[in-house]
Structures are given as structure tokens and as C-alpha cells.
Amino acid sequence: MLVSMAVIPLAAPGFWREHFGKVSAFWGFLTFAPLAALYGGPALESFMAMLLREYLPFIILLGALYAISGGILITGNARGTPGGNAAMLLAGTLLASVMGTTGAAMLLIRPLLRANAHRENRTLVVVFFIFLVANMGGALTPLGDPPLFLGYLMGVPFFWTLRLLPPMLLAAGLLTGVYYLADRLVYRYERPGDAGQKRSFRIRGAQNFVFLLVVTGALIAGGHMRLGRVGFLGVQREVSGIARDLLIFLMALCSMFFTPRDIRAENGFTWFPLKEVAMIFAGLFVCMTPCLDILQAGPSGRLGFLLGAVNRPSHYFWATGALSSFLDNAPSYLAFFKMALGSFYPGMEGGRAAGLLIKQHPAYLEAISAGAVFFGAFTYVGNAPNFMVLSLARESGVRMPGFLGYMIKCSLLVLLPLFILETLIFFR
């Protein structure tokens, strides 16, 4: 399935656009059917637990952030200069932990493209936008990036991820500085173009910020309330978690109802990106289920040899990051989080094991979290907003590099030295 996600959208984009749901369903069925036939009830319970406890809350949050951010329109006559663009990148980086990388990316990419419409070279700012706003800025809260939200669902306290502030600040500071120096050099040799019709700065759809605040409150409250459990299709779920998901879904409905249609039309809002992510992730979570169960079995499981090889924070940082680069980072985070739990606390219940890991071995979870969030910027398939930003940039006429070009010219050149530095300072 990973090969399908990486190759088909590039080799046969038309086929992928029409049939990505069938590709996802094919791999999901190929995983589910033989295991259900071999193991019966236990296999069905494991798959249902993954879909109801992990996938459903994840896609509800992602969809709500996408819908709410799509109802906010920012207009203005800003002119894209190296300094102005750098300021927008920093602002988006900070916003990403508040409204999610998807929300911040969808909110700011259109104003950024409009501000730079007169420029000859817009590729540079879009690439660094993917690095910072669509990925690394989401490191500080479970709202910021899907993998951290999955960790929150598994028992990581809401504000625990603030421990990632030092590595995030280092990454944001260095990347913004590199962007500013590079773009200043490029800007010096560009011919000024027509900036188009001037428009006064204005924010429309501001009521959506209220909906975002409610979503944030629902996430925080859902992690602290204990209202008992209910069973559904053989899976036990916290009542507080169900209430949280319903409230988040309600905020998405409110955004759709109370936001004028012309705002979404001017934003170019469509449901296709979310539809693509939802269908792909459904198959992806099914395919990951047996892998995660094997990892959680610990040293006594079939992958016990792998647990022995990955045994330091730096190992987890790079192993999680390597998988996050070519697979969306949420399942990658989940895999290595469960690997760490299986390594230190084999066979222990997930919530209790997560609490002990946070208390006794926090450096490992910090490395896993940073690896998942930071390395999501390494390829276009590393995080869902990367694809969305790429699509919008190309529609606006930006000459974006292809899959390998992005890795060779951008990621390996800029991000690889940064990650080595992060390892030496924070994740030895």
C-alpha cells in the first residue's frame, strides 16, 4: 500500500484521482480477509478497535479543522517580499499548533500565493511553507498534527507536547533564516511584476475562530473527564471521547451552516482533499493493525529482534522519521509508540503503559513525536497538508518540483543537516 501511495499519484495521476478509494479498499481487504478467516473473533475485535478508537476520532478532527479553516478568508494587498514572506511563515508556524497543520496551511496558502503572484520565483516560499506550516509548526499540541492527536487518544496529556518547544524553535528559526537569505538573493535579481488589483486587508468568516476554540476546549476536556465506558460492536470506548467527537463534528456543521458560501467559493474550497485522505487512511489503518499488534507484543513477538535494534532515543527519532517520510506520519507515530510500549512494558494495557513511558522514559516519546512531525516534511507523502499545498500551488501556476526533485533539491539539502543537528542537541 505504501508503494501505491508513493508511485501511482505520480505515475498515473488520472487513475489515482478516479480510483484511489478502490486502491485503498483493495489493500485493506487483502489484509483483513485472510486474518479474519484465520483468527475469527479476536481479529475482528482488533480491526474494529483500530477503526473506532483511532481512525474515527482522527478523521473527525481532521475533517473539522479542514472545514472550519476553509470558512476563513484573508484578503489584503500584501506584496510578497523576503521579509514579509518570512513573517507569514513564522505566523503560520505558530498557528499550526493552534488550528492544526491542515487548518493553518489551508488558511494561509492562498493569501501567500496571492501576495507573491507578481513574483517570478514562488517555488522557494511554497517549499518552506510545507516545511514549517504544513509540518513542523504542529509539534506543540495534539491539535497541531494528527500523530500527536493519536498519542493524546492513547493517554499522552494535552500539554505534554510543549516539551517539544526547544527543538521546534530551533527548526523554525534556522529554516526561516535560511529561507530569508535565499529568497533575498533571488529577489534581488527578479524583475518586478504587476501585483494586481489592490485589496484592503480583511478577515471574513471570523466566527470560525470561535468554532476552533470550542474544538480546542473539547479536546482538552475530553482528556480529563471520566464518564465511564460504553460498548459498540464489541469495542469499549470512553463516553467522554464520544462526546468530544460529537462536539467537534457539530462545530464542523456549524461552520458549514453559518459561513456564507461566497467565502468558501473564493477560497476554492472543495471536499476532494478530505475525501482522498479519509479513504486512503481507512485502508491504511486496516493494513497497519496486525503490524501494530505484533509490535505491541514486545520482545516475545515476531519482531522482537527489531525492538532490540531500536533502543535509543536517536534510533526512535530516525526510525519514526524515516517511515514518516514515505508514509503519512500518523501511522508511523503509532507504530513506534507501540513499539516503545512493547519494548518497556510488554503485554501491559496501553493507557497504563503510556503513563509509565511518559514518567520513566520521556526522552523516547519526545524522539518519536519529533520524528513523526518533523520528518513529515521530507516528502510530499509525509503529511496530508503537503499534498493539498502542492495541488493548490500548481493550480496557481507555481513550478513545483516532482517527487524526487523535492527530495533531492529541498529535503536532502536543507532538512537532512537540520535533523542531524537536532539529534546531536536533543535526541542522543
Image (cartoon, rainbow, N blue to C red):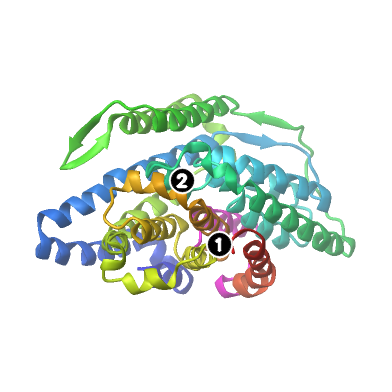
**Quick check: 267 above or below 128?**
above
Q: CA distance from mark 1 to mark 2?
A: 25 Å
| Residue drawn at x 24%, y 48% as measured from the top left | 49
Q: Quadrant of the N terminus?
A: bottom left
Number of marks drawn? 2
Residue 144: x and y in percent read 54, 44
Mark 2 element type = helix
Indicate left or right for 10 with 234 as reference. right
Q: Quadrant of the C terminus?
A: bottom right
Residue occupied by mark 1: 375
Indicate left or right for 423 with 228 as reference. right
Estimate how packed mark 2 is, as few (under 14), some (14 to 19) or many (20 or more) residues with alpha carbons within 10 Å: few
Is residue 32 shown in magenta?
no
Q: Nearer the viewer, residue 143 or 83?
A: 143
Residue 124: x and y in percent read 72, 61
Mark 1 element type = helix
| Residue drawn at x 77%, y 45% as measured from the top left | 87
Q: Nearer the viewer, residue 24 or 299?
A: 299
Front of the two marks 1 and 2: 2
Residue 95: x and y in percent read 63, 40
**Quick check: 263 above or below 386?**
above
Residue 174: x and y in percent read 74, 57
- The part of the chain drawn in magenta is 381-404
Lower sequence index among marks 1 and 2: 2
| Residue drawn at x 54%, y 34% as measured from the top left | 71
Residue occupied by mark 2: 359
**Quick check: 270 above or below 47?**
above
Q: Amino acid at mark 1?
A: Phe
